[in-house]
Image: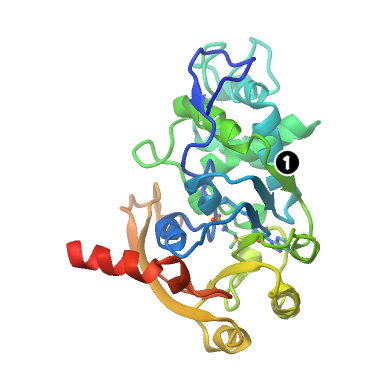
Amino acid sequence: MLFKRPDSSDNTYIMLNQCINSPFRYAGGKFYARKLILEHIPTHKYYIEPFAGGASVFFAKKKVLHNHLNDLDEELINVYKIIRDHPEELIFFLKRHSAVSRIPPDLIENVNVGDSLPATKELHSFFKKKFNPVNYLERAGRWFYLNRTSYSGIMNIQNMYWGYGDKYSMQPKNWAANIRRTSCKLQNVQLTSLDFEEVIDKAPSGSLLFVDPPYFNADQDKFYNCIFSREDHFRLEKCLRRNTHRLLIFITYDNTPEVKELYSWMTEIHDKEWNYCIQRTDDQKTKAPRKGTRYKGKEIFVLNYSSHDFGYKEVHQKKLMFA
Ligand SMILES: C[S@@+](CC[C@H](N)C(=O)[O-])C[C@H]1O[C@@H](n2cnc3c(N)ncnc32)[C@H](O)[C@@H]1O
């Protein structure tokens, strides 16, 4: 389907249901695992992410009849809502809009009116420490700027720091196109900021849930604004168990014996590994330039359905045969 926003300043027609990248950098995001995850997902009509974060999997897949993204973090959901409903206003906010601005003139002295705000350490620091948003749009604009210029997309203010590099980050001149295509994808998507339990208990029967909670064994309070306690992990397991008869459930978790034990009642548990790379401008302590560091993601995929029922094994075997 083709879609054109009536208020779009350019005349490009944009596909409404494209597979795209998440608009955000997001700590714990599943960007590098998204293809591996999609191989395990059966056909469905209702799709729900109770812990959406950067929603890498939702953006990488085709939309279905009903799509629902939820995250307890209200600031994050506010940005998604602004991108969905007011993309042009957000793009406008991220430009120098007049000679008189709430941004101190020395931070944007070389920027012409109408040009994108540049990605600089000074502006990052201004938005982080001094800028006081007065409405939902300004809250979203501040969040978006900080997210696109932060190391690893850590949005917890105490642990957020500058991490933009021209070579590996999305440049400000491309933010507008990113916001417009994200807005297209988010049309008719339900966006909520609720605790996971409410979302899962009320999910329509037959829905596919992609469940990506904060890790079981990691200091998650560093990354997110919502604290997820040990009790919350057990609460999640109970909630999924009482709904398992009526939902298709796919969970990703850190690979630990406790989680495997907790979910031993599910149909399949797969050990999975993938490579990823973290890029940063400089070492925050020594200020020395650094290249990207390679890591291995090691998680488990836990399913309450059999992936062989929808041909995962065959697809996989075929891939191996023809590799
Ligand atoms: C691992 S991240 C999700 C990453 C996401 N799949 C991606 O690709 O970017 C976990 C998310 O759970 C959210 N969260 C924490 N506690 C929650 C709760 N009680 N209910 C719903 N979401 C919660 C956090 O704000 C965070 O965004």
Mark 1: secondary structure: helix
In this orientation, does residue 78 appear? yes
Q: Residue 261 falls in which quadrant of the image?
A: bottom right
134 relative to 321 in the view: left or right: right
The residue at which mark 1 appears reads as 78
What residue is rendered at 60% in x and 57% in y?
Answer: 159
Q: Quadrant of ligand 1?
A: bottom right
Q: Is residue 202 above or below residue 13?
A: below
At horizontal 63% and vertical 54% (from top left) the residue drawn is 47
Q: How many marks?
A: 1
Q: Amino acid at mark 1?
A: Asn
Residue beneath the point at 59% across and 16% down: 8
Q: Residue at x 65, y 47 (%)?
A: 67
Say whether residue 226 is left or right of residue 222: right
Residue 222: % across, % down: 62, 64
Q: Quadrant of residue 72?
A: bottom right
Location of the C terminus by quadrant is: bottom left
Q: Is residue 213 left or right of residue 152?
A: right
Q: Position of residue 286 (x, y in %)?
A: 40, 56
Residues packed near mark 1 inside 10 Å, few (<14), some (14 to 19) or many (20 plus): some
Inspect this view and state whether residue 118 appears: no
* Left or right: residue 140 compared with residue 321: right
Along the line of sight, which residue is nearer the eye, 123 or 33? 33
On whether ligand 1 comes within 8 Å of the CB at mark 1, the answer is no
User: Which color mode does the image show?
Assistant: rainbow
Q: Position of residue 2 (x, y in %)?
A: 52, 24
Relative to residue 176, is residue 65 depicted above or below? below
Estimate the x, y position of residue 126 in percent, counting from the top left.
63, 35
Q: Residue furthest left?
A: 322
Q: Identify whether 236 is placed above or below 289.
A: below
